[in-house]
Image: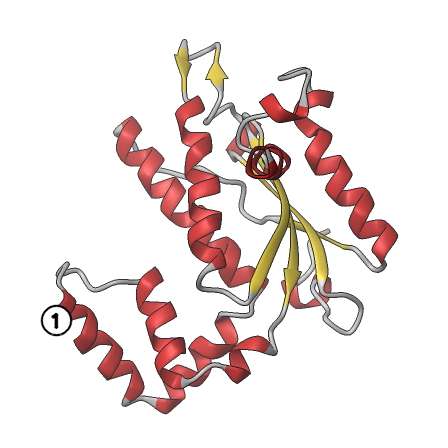
Amino acid sequence: MTYARQALVSLNDTAYYHVVARCVRRAWLWGYDKYAGRDFSQRKAWVSERLTLLASMFAIDACAYAVMSNHLHVVVHLDPGAPLTWTDSEVAERWVRQYPPRESSEAARTAQIERLLANPERLAVLRQRLGSLSWLMKCLVEPIARRANVEDGCKGRFWEGRFKAQRLCDERAVLAAMVYVDLNPVRAGITERLETSHHTSVAARLHSSS
């Protein structure tokens, strides 16, 4: 049985969630696909790049992540109250960073921001979205799916229909989920050492501290 997303994500219970998104049919669409005889591993970098970009837009922190060959794990912290402290200009600029105008120019970008600033009702909607887990995942997975389909010259689904979100209701659960995510490549036999587990938050932390 599936449940409405609002029934799964409840900030009255916790602000921390362990999120899992899988490729359709759990196919290895960003690893080595032995059936297709192709290696799609370069796509793993797309996720970490998107997460870094989205962290500068949304009021959500990625505490840990690991990109596997057919799925990804992210431990996130939601702070939907933060956008309420942002100015209208900041909300508009963050949104346009994610959804820029078709014309790639500063003038077009400025015009789009000004249109949003002139529409308070629209700004209120965007302010709410910038603290939403569902919108974060939408902005993470949809561009990756489109980019992969262009690369493969095909159409159709890249991801399973819904991402899974598990509540992490206390500090112990958060730490356990982060350890699980950090150790996922080691457990799967992809690598033997954390510092060589590419496309993971733990490797990024180790390299930045060295």
Q: Is residue 184 left or right of residue 112?
A: right
Position of residue 27 measured from the top left corner of the image (x, y, whole percent): 52, 25
Is 133 above or below relative to 185?
below
Position of residue 84 measured from the top left corner of the image (x, y, whole percent): 54, 83
Q: How crowded is the residue under tag 1: few (<14 C-alpha within 10 Å), some, or many (20+)?
A: few
Position of residue 102 measured from the top left corner of the image (x, y, whole percent): 17, 60
Q: Nearer the viewer, residue 101 or 82?
A: 82
When asked about the image quadrant of residue 152, the answer is: top left
Q: Nearer the viewer, residue 99 or 91?
A: 91
Its colouring scheme is secondary structure
- Work out which quarter of the rendered image holds the C terminus and state it: top right
Query: Residue at point 68% right, 15% down?
Result: 192
Q: Is residue 200 left or right of residue 11?
A: left
Q: Secondary structure at mark 1?
A: helix
Query: Residue at point 45% right, 84% down?
Result: 124
Residue tagged by mark 1? 107
When asked about the image quadrant of residue 190, the answer is: top right
Amino acid type at circle 1 is Ala
Query: Residue at point 56% right, 67% down?
Result: 132
Is 46 above or below relative to 76?
above
Is 13 above or below relative to 87?
above
Position of residue 82 measured from the top left corner of the image (x, y, whole percent): 57, 76
Q: How many marks overall?
A: 1
When asked about the image quadrant of residue 92, the answer is: bottom left
Seen from this angle, which residue lies furthest front? 210
Q: Is residue 200 left or right of residue 169?
A: left
Q: Nearer the viewer, residue 210 or 106?
A: 210
